[in-house]
Image (spheres, rainbow, N blue to C red):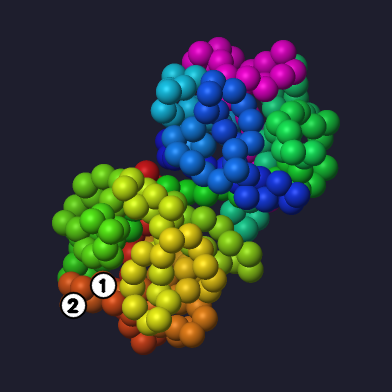
Amino acid sequence: MSKIALEALGGESGKYLSHAKDEVWLQTGNQGDGEVFNIIETSKGRVALACLGKEKGKYLSHAFAKLWLQDGIQGEGEEWICHDKGNGNIAFECLGKEKGLFLSHALDKMWLQNGYQGEGELWAKQEFIALEALGAEKGSYLSHAKDEVWLQKGNQGDGEVFIKELRPKGRVALACLGKERGKYLSHAFAKLWLQDGVQGEGEEWICHDKGNGNVAFECLGKETGTDLSHAFDKMWLQNGYQGEGELWAKQAQ
């Protein structure tokens, strides 16, 4: 089980699947728990989408050929097949009597589309992650708590959790939670800090998969060629990837 937010693609880019107000709709931006789901593997490769916040205990349902929030998992009406479409993008196919229908945001509304037609049924899966330093700093986590960028001993909560947002051209941005919600990890001006929103390449990174769930983050823009580093027990930008000092264990939250 892990937390995800689902951003619509295509004409509805920038909007998120929401269960806030006990409804199924498209919210402009990720505003909080109303746009967050726990994705749960049920059986036979199926998944269910559990609500957080005020709707906790409810699940996204396609039963009776409509989209609504069901109390608990009652059967196939709350189960979906999650199709991997590459680049972190996914599509959700119904099961049971609605088999063959897909979760759609096309035409700026939430509905069930007859088959997968394209971007109208495509969602960018945004993960909630914590980043544990490896090497000599193992056990410390990248933190945005106190409105700063630093290494926290252990994962203490929202201050050590980021939303890994997918950006064009295979890039990512790291969005804060908690008191720093709305801010992003930035390398602009060759320093590490928290920027209000994504202003440009200064808040974008290339996430390199190093295997075994470990990743490294390379800067873009004027800082191209430098990497996010925790070496020497501090947060800074290292000239290139040198080893464990720039290696992070990605932990789903």
**Label 1: few (<14), some or many (≥20) within 10 Å?**
some
Q: Residue at x 56, y 58 (%)?
A: 166
Q: Position of residue 134 (x, y in %)?
A: 26, 66
What residue is rendered at 74% in x and 51% in y?
Answer: 10
Q: Which residue is mark 1?
A: 235
Q: CA distance from mark 2 to mark 1?
A: 9 Å
**In front of the other: 58 or 241:** 58
Q: Is residue 139 left or right of residue 45?
A: left
Residue 84 visible to the viewer: no
What stretch of residues is rendered in magenta? Answer: 60-85
Residue 66 among those drawn in magenta: yes
Image point 21% across, 63% down: which residue? 151
Give, as a three-letter code, the residue at label 2: Phe
**Residue that mark 2 sits on:** 232
Q: Position of residue 190 (x, y in %)?
A: 38, 82
Q: For mark 2, does the 10 Å Cα neighbourhood hold few (<14), some (14 to 19), or many (20 or more) residues?
A: few
What kind of element bears circle 2?
Answer: helix
Amino acid identity at mark 1:
Met
- Quadrant location, the C terminus: top left
Q: Which mark is residue 98?
A: none
Give the side of residue 71 with respect to residue 211, left or right: right
Q: Write the residue at 47% across / 68% down.
A: 203
Q: Would residue 227 be visible to someone looking at this image?
A: yes
Against 62, residue 244 (above or below) is below
Mark 2 touches mark 1? (CB < 8 Å) = no
Residue at the limit of the structure toward the front, as seen here = 196
